[in-house]
Image (cartoon, coloured by chain):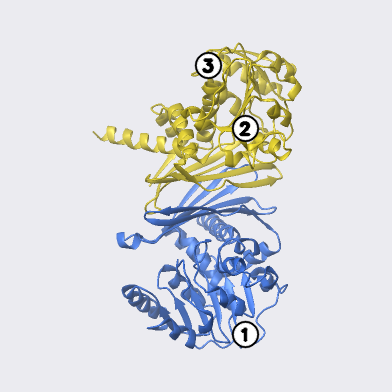
Chain colours: A yellow, B blue
């Protein structure tokens, strides 16, 4: 049994094609090749925090994976990252533990960012002049960083509540080749950006229907639990196409959940991203449509990233023994 | 962050009062002091196996605990134990990982055995002349071993499907001071034993209503999933008192689940063991009653045992530094 720490994981990731692994995970999931347990969730009141436990396996595969990831959003006050967690890889034949990936939430951040990039790849308008980012935390940075490989645009508007965080975001993202301006008002984003990514743990809407212009794609990342929400439900009612990572999961959590509950949309108007990727469901057909991707996070993504890291680590080990 | 291996855990357990910790866990649970996520379950077909993930925390406590435990029942053919797993202790204030207990399923076996002993303590007839054990695997041994501290009787009848296992059981349990006979027929058990413990992963009934005599207590341990069952549902209909570890959990899994589904019993006739312990629910009142304890396993028990081991390990560490 191996225990792999974060530094080593980052090293291993240099030889992993994360985007391809996560894209395949979406397709596998929508084609029914993944068995996963419903997400387990623990909610903490004081200080506020939440823990998500995801688990599952690919049919006929040798592994099963359990992922534990938490968000304690006051941690930065204590100079601690808000994300924590780990991934565990077991034998699906005997139950033996093969590896513990002590990723401290890093792999979750990474696969979530990859998922955002894949959503943009299939749903963003062909012409994006400005990218809008809502939130300036870790996930905001990861999202923008991964968008580099699928979107040519390097002009960014960012909106957030913490000026120090926004300044840091601006500085760090400039180093990645982006030109970043800080939005004074959230409507600066909706007026100017064709691709908007929302990345906050908000529990009430930040974006409203009347603000959203034709030709916008929004990827909603933050709402991974029933009590979280970043988009006014009417945005979903207004959209031409809504993609979800999982029809089953978004019926219980995320932006779609709120819109379904208010009967503003129906399950029939939703398409799984995996089916959009494989061609079994429609894509955006022109640059005037409004499209939404509601991503709540799949065990399938965790399985894919954990397996990729574990397999690469074994390959690197064998190579070093040659 | 500490990684504590099984050998060390066994050493630490010498200074842990498991029975008291688990008894308190039942009371805490029934008094609403535990928050836990619904059990996550993964089922494997080939080879057959199941994984249960339990997680939760005590309100106002500093920790949250996640437990992963699996049963792959063909493992013994490969000379591997059927149980595997680990427990993880995190901060409920920041999400940081404090400790990994690599117990390989041992702590689950232990707390399950302690739960069985507590059920017997509160529900078995005052006069037990013979203990009946159904199944001869690891859990059968653990159950009998823990019964020593709550029941004076040392006469045992065991029934199982594997003669080598039964012989091994007989030998090992004799070393613990029991006089063990192997039952030829399951009715030998029901005719002679006032306390019966069922410990198999059976998916169809092993004991039937007409076999059960007045003055019997049965603790059903094996059925921790919806597809598992050791008792004919009519046994529950016939019982004078049915105790469960959790009203919520046994509505979805275990023996009670099957009896509820067939409308043979109602939720109103069920009492939580935690309430029986605290005096808020009735106990057995005479030696002629038939009582059942249906135990499906609680996150509260996992939290209790994991915390006990972790706290003892820290105390031992401090002592060694003095």
Left or right, B264 with respect to A24, comes to right
Q: CA distance from mark 3 to mark 2?
A: 26 Å
Residue B174's place in the image compared with A69, above or below, is below
Q: Looking at this view, is B195 or A126 the one in front? A: A126
Q: Which residue is mark 2?
A: A269
Q: Which residue in the structure is indicated by mark 1?
A: B289
The residue that disc 3 covers is A151
Q: From what the image shows, is residue A257 above or below residue A121?
A: below
Q: Chain of mark 2?
A: A
- Residue A290 position by quadrant: top right
In this rendering, the label closer to the viewer, 3 or 2: 2
Q: CA distance from mark 1 to mark 2?
A: 58 Å
| In this rendering, the label closer to the viewer, 1 or 2 | 2
Q: Which residue sits at x=41%, y=35%?
A: A309
Can you give x and y, in whole percent of width and height, for residue B240 in the image? 64, 80
The chain that hosts pointer 1 is B
From the top left corner, tell me how far across and down residue B43 is, in percent.
46, 54
Mark 1 in CB contact with mark 3 (< 8 angstroms): no
The chain letter under disc 3 is A
Task: Looking at the picture, tell me which residue is in the foreground, A153 or B301.
Answer: A153
Q: Is residue A129 above or below residue A202?
A: above
């Amino acid at each position: 049994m191996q225990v792999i720490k974060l530094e080593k994981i980052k090293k291993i990731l240099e030889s992993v094609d994360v985007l391809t692994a996560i894209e395949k995970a979406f397709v596998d999931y929508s084609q029914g090749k993944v068995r996963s347990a419903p997400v387990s969730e623990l909610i903490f009141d004081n200080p506020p925090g939440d823990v998500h436990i995801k688990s599952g396996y690919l049919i006929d595969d040798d592994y099963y994976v359990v992922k534990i990831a938490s968000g304690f959003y006051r941690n930065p006050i204590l100079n601690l990252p808000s994300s924590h967690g780990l991934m565990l890889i077991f034998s699906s034949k005997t139950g033996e533990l093969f590896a513990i990936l002590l990723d401290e939430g890093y792999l979750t951040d990474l696969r979530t960012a990859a998922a955002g990039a894949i959503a943009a790849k299939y749903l963003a308008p062909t012409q994006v002049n400005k990218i809008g980012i809502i939130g300036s935390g870790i996930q905001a940075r990861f999202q923008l960083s991964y968008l580099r490989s699928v979107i040519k645009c390097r002009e960014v508007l960012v909106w957030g509540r913490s000026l120090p965080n926004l300044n840091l975001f601006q500085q760090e993202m400039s180093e990645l080749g982006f030109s970043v301006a800080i939005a004074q008002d959230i409507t600066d984003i909706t007026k100017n950006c064709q691709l908007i990514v929302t990345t906050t743990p908000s529990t009430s809407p930040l974006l409203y229907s009347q603000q959203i212009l034709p030709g916008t794609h929004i990827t909603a990342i933050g709402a991974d639990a029933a009590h979280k929400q970043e988009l006014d439900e009417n945005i979903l009612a207004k959209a031409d196409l809504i993609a979800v990572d999982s029809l089953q999961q978004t019926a219980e959590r995320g932006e779609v959940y709120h819109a379904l509950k208010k009967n503003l949309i129906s399950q029939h108007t939703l398409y799984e991203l995996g089916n959009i990727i494989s061609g079994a469901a429609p894509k955006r057909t022109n640059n005037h449509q409004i499209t939404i991707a509601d991503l709540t996070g799949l065990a399938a993504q965790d399985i894919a990233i954990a397996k990729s890291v574990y397999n690469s680590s074994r390959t690197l080990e064998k190579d070093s023994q040659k």
